[in-house]
Image (cartoon, rainbow, N blue to C red):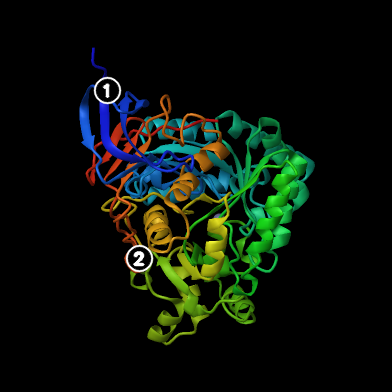
Amino acid sequence: VADTYDIIIRNALVVDGTGSPGRPADVGIRDDTIAAVGTVQGDAGHTLDATGLVLAPGFIDIHTHSDRTLVIDPGCDGALAQGVTTHVIGNCGSSPVPAIDDYAEEEDAFFARYDIKRTWSTMAEYLRAIDERGVGLNVVALAGHGAIRRAAMGGSHMRPPDARELTAMRRHIADSLDAGAIGMSTGLIYPPSSYADTEELVEISKEMGQADRIYATHMRDEGLGLLDSVNEAIEIGRRSGSRVQIAHHKASDPRAWGLVNESLALIDQANADGLEIDFDQYPYRATSNGLASLLPAWVHEGGNKAILARVRDRQQRARMVDEILSREGPRAGITWDDVLVADCRGDRTADGKTIAQLARERKMDPVDVLMDLLDKSDGIVAGIYFSLSEDDIVTVMQHPGMIVGSDSSARVIGGKTHEGKPHPRGYGTFPRILGEYVRDRGVLTLEDAVRKMTSRPAEKLRLDDRGTIDVGKRADIVLFNPATVRETATFQEPHAYPEGIPTVIVNGRLAFLNGERQDTLAGRVLRA
Ligand SMILES: [Zn+2]
């Protein structure tokens, strides 16, 4: 009796995610599971010929910010089009829950712009809402320390917590972990996370230590203080017992270029000492975060509403301008030519231009352009900063421990999230590595690049049933053409899907077939 499958993929070059050399094989899928690998006989609902294509496990993006975009545009096409079938959300200290008091108001204001009514306040409610609404890819959640700190400390959160508040933070974290979050993230350059000292972070990370979960961190300083920051992350892992994930590892200040050689050595030593310290990377010279991050720290007390009020207050604005002008550039080591406006809702003519360019066009001082854009967009403007070294990117990429993470959000071309000119990494991270860094420059072998996109993150996240091509694993699968795969997104025109990735399968269901998005929301929340 011939076996029957839902999908058989024939004549693929299987790159299985372990790093082993690719080998020709067929793959049979039944329901949401890989049911056969090798020479597969039998019938199937769909039989796909993959001659000339690589078949790999669906890519796992260990570092994203899709928390809100996957609510707005659940399809997540911009991630699926890259072959990505799982997103880890809640990074850099930022998550939409817990949403309490003024933080809940900020979330409501954000979602109202997309005609969405927030129905969740806790991690459990939020993850349930994702499952109920449907989602195009699998979702693993981190709880953001920023939201947790605000929930525990209220409006006045730019100070150390007292004992009662520290206990409240631990309770919020424990609730999030109970709801299935894989861990907690910090964004130690962003208020209010930036006001947490090492002791606070050790104390609250004991929740992750007890539950064998992850402490993920956007570190305190990725410039001249890079090594101190890595040492702090290692110390938090050692003293709390949590498994550490260092976000988007890089030296983001030109004066600190090259320090990644030493930071990677610190990480290697910590792992040799028995800790679990990992890191991720995106393959671009430019970083991205809100332009408000260029404002002095005191401006951030009280959140968005308070920032905006200060920008609109003549005296306080003058004080900010003075403080920014006293720096050498917008921030250490870069100039206003290195700062690109990515998403300015209140002035779409600014998107895709540098602050220096806008200053020339508008015959204004760059710092006044900055203030003007923040004022017009209610304080929320995304920016892009060209501040990394290509040599460092290659150094970090070639480290055997590297895990790929886009640091971006899943968007949908033609959807509500098709707005502004966001960093192209949201559409291009995975094809860029496979095209430019593997095929064109030989920085990585194909097998090693796939390993860093699949089994490495699956190991880190303890996703035991994903990340390799084996019988019994969940059928998250990508087919791509190694000769043609490439990123097409650019900084000027970022909303563009890559080429050479025709077919993507999520939990056994076709998400892309021969380059066409299928009508599926086949993702699931993967609870720890
Ligand atoms: Zn970050």
In the picture, the disc for residue 490 is: 2
Tell me the element at label 1.
strand
Residue at the image position 45 percent from the left and 81 percent from the top: 356
276 left or right, relative to 354: right
Is 52 displayed left or right of 127 in the figure?
left
Query: In the rendered view of the protein, which quadrant contains the C terminus?
Result: top right
Answer few, some or many: residues within 10 Å of disc 2's Cα (few below 14, many 20 plus, some between 14 and 19). some
Amino acid beneath label 2 = Thr
Where residue 232 sits: x, y (%)? 73, 53
Location of the N terminus by quadrant is top left
Quarter location, residue 258: bottom right
Q: Count residues near mark 1 (Cα–Cα under 10 Å), then give few for <14, some for 14-19, many for 20+.
A: many
Q: Nearer the viewer, residue 67 or 29?
A: 29
Regarding residue 411, the answer to whether it shows in the image is yes
Percent coordinates x, y for residue 397 in the rendering = 53, 57
- Identify the residue position indicated by label 1 in the image: 5
- Structural distance between the alpha carbons of marks 1 and 2: 40 Å
